[in-house]
Image: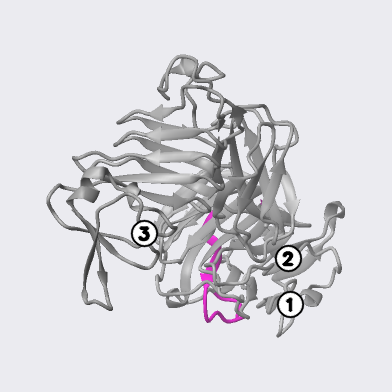
Amino acid sequence: MKTYQQIQMNKFLKSYYFKGIMLLIFAWADGGNVWGQLLQQDFESSTTVSDYVSPTPNNGQFNAIGSSNATNMIVSVNTVGGINKLSFEKLAHPGSGSFSRTTDFSPVPNSLIFQLDLTVSGNYSAQTTAAIFQVGSAFGTANSAEANANIHSRFGLNFTSNPGEFSLREIGNGTNTSIYSGTRKITFVINNSGATINYLAPNGTIESIGDDKFDLWVGNNKEFDERNATTFSQTLTDIKFIFNTNTGIFGTIDIDNILIDPIPPAINLQTPTNVLDNSLTLNWVPVSGVTGYRVDVSTSPGFATFVSGYENLYLPGSATSNLSLSGLSTGTKYYYRIRAVSEYTLGSFSGAFSDGEISTTIQNNWQGNFSSNWNLKGNWALDSVPQGFHNITIPSSPTNQPEIPAGFAADCYNLIIDAGASLSMAAGAKFNVNGNLENNGTLTVKSDATGQVGTVIAASASGTGTTNVEQYLTLNRWWYVSSPVGNPHSSLYSPAMVANGLRYYDEPSTGYIFINDGTTALNPNIGYYTR
């Protein structure tokens, strides 16, 4: 036996730059931190080293830049070539030079990218670890290396016996990189977040790095991959560069265009909206503290080509959360990727891409020329069964109104059932409406005696029509029926069920009242029994 519950449809289911070395520090923190520039300096505002030092440094200053012997280790702002750079020149022994930032970065970053363009000159003898770059906490300003206990991660700079040549060193296990010369960009990536994180690498790829590990890049070459940190428990609040060679080892290291800044995280995409045949709107959750976003749109999943106007498109403003695309092709799948960026005078930093895909819509109306079978392509205006990017209208005029057969999973974007039109779903059929379901006619969702029932999932719903949801009840058992939401009559139930007994409990008479006809109004807020 079966019963229909009628529902009125209003809602439905619902860079540090050593001129030769560019030292960029990027930090990225969790969602609770405020993003902002940590340090930026190109040494163009003054040729006096002390102008770049303060006991309470701003985001363009250090706590200390100096040497232990001003005669043997000359620290200066070098203007050779018309470009200012911070220069450390070792002429005799003893003598060491350094810069340090010991005022903690705030907020405390839980990962860093420490990037630098490095130039070495005047070196004639080889030395392992002639200089060290260190990141950790509780650093001092002395011209000496920090204790291992204060260092989270570090790498060394080796001199060769050929002037201008150098390599980098993982100090912990004594591994060296290839030998380089000239100006090289070094990228030192450190993770202390407690989890694996992703970052946009110098070569444009998205790289992952585990907790308490570091990567080291020279240009686009990844020299060290996920090497262990020195002291896992240290935080990433301080930095130090120390140049201290042995007796008879001399040379110069230049530094310029220092930039230290957080890298934004990957953004969270939201469902595109306003999807039409030639336009749509991309949406995402904005990231606090970035300068804006970069967007790519393509018809190629590998982004081999780009839609005109939507290649690396910059959208300023951290609060920006959407982009309207226009001039698109009808019924076409588009791939998009969005990344949060921080773009400054000395560099640009980016989070990882967040990728999505969406199709523009195309109209494919029901015609019913051959039958009521939804799955017959000849019944449709485009001579094809609807897909997830099709907009469908079911008009009232066709004699054959559509039915989705059992076991079939139907799909569309928007669906409109016109007044006087109907759509039936067999038991076990499924229907996914990616956009809006507007029912102004009749939607019937059927079931069978085995317990199968049709299933409808819609992103949103509207309309003034009626939805019938069918349910089978086993014969000769009493069943509780929920209170009506409208004012139906007992004819809603099959005649056999009415004949077998439809009743409700009457409080005043403390007894059950039986209904044995199809004309009795069923009142809201009253529960009924049937069998």
What stretch of residues is rendered in magenta?
119-144
Q: Residues within 10 Å of mark 3 (few under 14, many from 20)?
A: many
Residue sitting nearer the eye, 403 or 311: 403
Verify whether residue 60 appears in magenta: no
Residue located beneath label 3 in the image = 522
- The amino acid at mark 3 is Leu
Q: Check residue 128 for magenta coloring.
A: yes
- Locate residue 221, reporting x and y percent: 54, 42
Q: Amino acid at mark 1?
A: Asn
Q: Is there CB contact under 8 Å for labels 2 and 3?
A: no
State which tag comes first along the sequence, 3 or 1.
1
152 or 33, which lies in front?
33
Look at the numbered disc 1 and give the secondary structure of its residue. Answer: loop
- Could one spot residue 55 in this view of the protein? yes
Q: Earlier in the sequence, mark 2 or mark 1?
A: 2
Q: Position of residue 260 (x, y in %)?
A: 66, 64
**Dot 2: what SS?**
strand
Q: CA distance from mark 2 to mark 3?
A: 75 Å
Q: Is residue 163 visible?
A: no
Q: Residue at x 40, y 22 (%)?
A: 373
The residue labelled by disc 1 is: 58
- In the picture, measured across the screen, residue 363 lies left or right of residue 486, that is right
Question: Which residue is tagged 2?
Answer: 40
317 on left or right of 397: right
Residue type at mark 2: give it.
Answer: Gln
Outermost bottom residue: 55
The circle on residue 33 is none
Q: Residue at x 33, y 52 (%)?
A: 490
